Image (cartoon, rainbow, N blue to C red):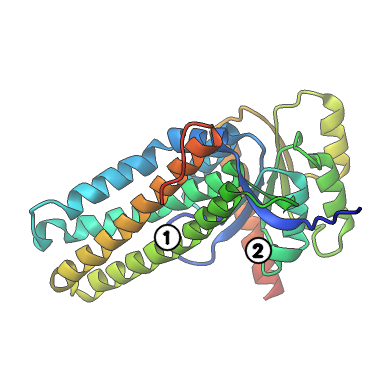
Amino acid sequence: MSTTTTAVATTMVNAAFLQEVKDSNLQFWQNIHDFKRLLYSAAGPIEHAAKLVKLLGELRDSMAVEFSLEETYGYIDGSYSVQSVSAAKAGIAKRQHRELYLRLHEISESAEEAQYRGTIVDDFGSLVSVCKEFLDSLEAHEKHESELIRYELGMGRFGR
Amino acid sequence: MPLVTSESTGRALEIMLVEDSLLDARLTIEALKRCGIFHRLSLFRDGGEAMGFLNRKGVFARAPRPDVILLDLILPHVDGVAVLRELRAERVLKNIPVVVLTSSDDGEDQKQCEALGVNNYIRKPFNEQKFLAVIRHLKELSLVTEFATA
């Protein structure tokens, strides 16, 4: 009897390192906190428009650093013969990095353009809406990675 | 997604950082952010993956050619000296400036790197001002090369 296994490109998570990266980038978490606070504050566009544009740029830069460090030290790409549930989840998390970065880049660029054209106050309502949608996606991603870390460390199960 | 950008205008200086220590990578990234030079950084933790990027293999088929390589010596899989040797043997890669960032105090390592034509050899933990002066100098060199070949 013979068996054949095929190695396929797989992403594995290095849970301890991924957690370490997350724990050490205070700037990123501060940017998210400031961003969220501004989006849900009661103040209007005149007070907040310029601040939101600036925060979008800062969040984009700190997120790029965070995702870059996470992918370099928190994930391991390779060829393995066994596809695990966590490998599939790790692959999804890495894809989400790309999608989130591109989305934030796009939002940030359009906000800067609106500021340049002088339409930022008029566009503020719709800008806040897309920022809230983005924030929801980012938080869902962080929850996904948190579950992945807990699963790899034997501390939890994946949600549905 | 090994990309980091800093805010400015004009073409970004393409920097490749090959570093297996998370802490050292973070310190280098933070120093570069304070440098004020518009740059894009590609980060790798082992020499094999770094060579794949430089040789544009597989997923790196459309990788940018770095203007500067910041190279640690002690790396998993393929070490920094092996990367340097391979780099200097490739016609299209051999002229890329390389700055070695290492915690090694072995004089032999430095001799070997100098024989392979590294532009700078910096011991970690590095003096940030000296490190940034090296990066600024290499940025100027890359502009001169770009102008001369335009």
Picture coordinates of residue A18, whole percent (x, y): 53, 39
Amino acid type indicated by mark 2: Val
Residue B63 sits in which quadrant? Answer: bottom right
| Mark number displayed over residue A100 | 1
Q: Using the image as rendered, state which of residue A88 and residue A127 is in the foreground.
A: A88
Residue lying at 16% horizontally and 52% vertically, measured from the top left: A40
Picture coordinates of residue B93, whole percent (x, y): 80, 60
The residue beneath circle 2 is: B144
Nearer the viewer's eye, disc 2 or disc 1? Answer: 1
Picture coordinates of residue A124, whole percent (x, y): 17, 67
Vertical position of residue B3 compared to residue A159: above or below: below
Amino acid type indicated by mark 1: Leu
Q: Using the image as rendered, state which of residue A146 and residue B122 is in the foreground.
A: A146
Residue found at the far right of this picture: A1
Q: Does residue B103 appear to the left or right of A32 in the view shown?
A: right
Residue lying at 53% horizontally and 52% vertically, measured from the top left: A89
Q: Does residue B2 appear to the left or right of B141 in the view shown?
A: left
| Mark number displayed over residue A140 | none
Picture coordinates of residue A36, whole percent (x, y): 23, 49
Mark 2 and mark 1 on one chain: no
Q: How many marks?
A: 2
